Image (cartoon, rainbow, N blue to C red):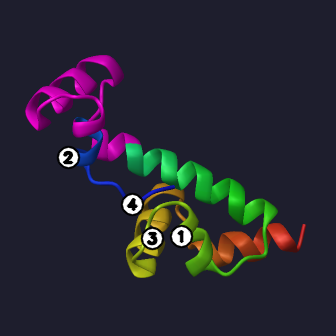
Amino acid sequence: MYDLKIQDFANIANRSLSTFKREFKEHYDTSPGKWLTARRMKRAKAMLQLDSKPIIQIAFECGITNVSHFSRVFKETFGISPSTYQQDWTHK
């Protein structure tokens, strides 16, 4: 939910950036950035199902400060815009 950079995660893990990325890839079979984006999108999808909060607030609570970036990545991930997804769930 925080807008931390990969370097911040490497610092928290007490690793250099390159070591952190390499070890992360070995363990999770994906890059830290892709993993983090996937987790954020999964959380956003769940929040859109449960909350009637504005899209911008949900994006922010998922650690994404640029709402147009959030909308684009959500649509690339799930094939539907976050606003349409939220509307579809509220009408079920």
- Give the SS element for disc 1: helix
Q: Are marks 1 and 4 in contact (CB under 8 Å)?
A: no
Query: Which quadrant would residue 32 be assigned to in this image?
Result: top left
In this rendering, the label closer to the viewer, 1 or 4: 4
In this rendering, the label closer to the viewer, 3 or 4: 4
Q: Is residue 33 visible?
A: yes
Residue 6 x, y percent position in the rendering:
25, 46
Q: Residue at x 29, y 46 (%)?
A: 33
- Residue 28 lies, with reference to residue 61, above or below; the image says above
- The amino acid beneath tag 2 is Gln
Q: How many other residues sit within 10 Å of disc 2, few (<14), some (14-19) or many (≥20)?
A: some
- The amino acid beneath tag 4 is Asp
- Upstream in the sequence, badge 3 or badge 1? 1
- The amino acid beneath tag 3 is Phe
Q: Residue at x 11, y 32 (%)?
A: 16
- Upstream in the sequence, badge 3 or badge 4? 4
By secondary structure, the bulk of the magenta-drawn segment is best described as helix
Q: Which residue is mark 3?
A: 70
- State left or right for residue 91 relative to residue 8: right
Q: Nearer the viewer, residue 49 or 81?
A: 49
Which circle marks residue 7 in the picture? 2
Q: Which residue is mark 1?
A: 59
Residue 88 x, y percent position in the rendering:
77, 71
Q: Which residue is mark 4?
A: 3
In this rendering, the label closer to the viewer, 1 or 2: 2
Magenta span of residues:
11-35
Real-space Cα distance between discs 1 and 4?
Answer: 11 Å
Q: Residue at x 45, y 57 (%)?
A: 2
Query: Which quadrant would residue 51 be assigned to in this image?
Result: bottom right
- Upstream in the sequence, badge 1 or badge 2? 2
